[in-house]
């Protein structure tokens, strides 16, 4: 532990309430919060070195409007599947003067394993079809 952290630890707790809870110095609390907001700082490590519960320090961070995001843990839960569906657009006719095909064919693979081919679709309607597909209630959990 560095000298600065030892000094902060000495100044942080200024007394105890009748029920045993600690009373903290406001300046020392502000310094600890500032240290926690440094890039790469570990709230739990700093709290432990100052002799305080990490939940208390997190509460001080929230009270001052600082929100720290937890790192994603690969072992806790499976990643949520994306609500977006990949929709490749394949040209089936000769492009017009601007290089945009007038008729396309869509091949869609939904998260539940359903594949859908939409052929002869006018380019002007592709957006409407994609919006309609986006509104479908379909999840990977319905895959049978």
Image (cartoon, rainbow, N blue to C red):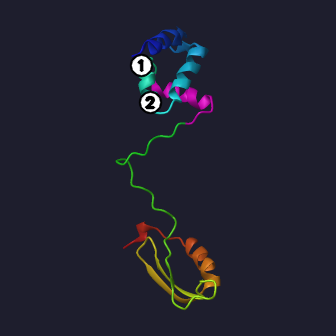
**Residue on which disc 2 sits:** 42
Residue 57 percent coordinates (x, y): 51, 25
Local SS, label 2: loop
Query: Quick check: 138 left or right of 130?
Result: left
Is 138 included in the stretch rendered in magenta?
no
Judge whether 109 appears above or below 47 on screen.
Answer: below
Residue occupying the point 42% across, 67% down? 140
Number of the label disc, if any, that sits on residue 49: 1
Q: Read off the magenta span.
A: 53-67
Query: Sequence-wise, which precedes: disc 1 or disc 2?
Result: 2
Q: Nearer the viewer, residue 22 or 99?
A: 99
Image quadrant holding the C terminus, namely: bottom left
Image quadrant holding the N terminus, namely: top left
- The main secondary structure of the magenta stretch is helix
Local SS, label 1: helix
Q: Nearer the viewer, residue 55 or 131?
A: 131
Query: Quick check: 79 left or right of 100?
Result: left
Is 60 included in the stretch rendered in magenta?
yes
Residue 97 percent coordinates (x, y): 63, 87
């Amino acid at each position: 532990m560095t000298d600065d952290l030892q000094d902060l630890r000495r100044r942080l707790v200024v007394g105890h309430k009748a029920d045993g809870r600690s009373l903290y110095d406001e300046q020392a609390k502000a310094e600890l919060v500032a240290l926690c907001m440094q890039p790469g700082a570990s709230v739990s490590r700093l709290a432990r070195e100052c002799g305080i519960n990490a939940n208390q320090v997190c509460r001080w961070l929230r009270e001052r409007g600082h929100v720290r995001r937890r790192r994603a843990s690969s072992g806790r839960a499976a990643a949520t599947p994306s609500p977006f569906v990949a929709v490749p657009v394949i040209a089936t006719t000769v492009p017009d003067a601007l290089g945009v095909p007038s008729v396309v064919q869509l091949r869609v693979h939904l998260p539940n394993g359903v594949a859908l081919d939409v052929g002869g679709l006018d380019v002007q309607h592709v957006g409407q079809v994609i919006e309609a597909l986006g509104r479908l209630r379909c999840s990977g959990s319905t895959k049978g």
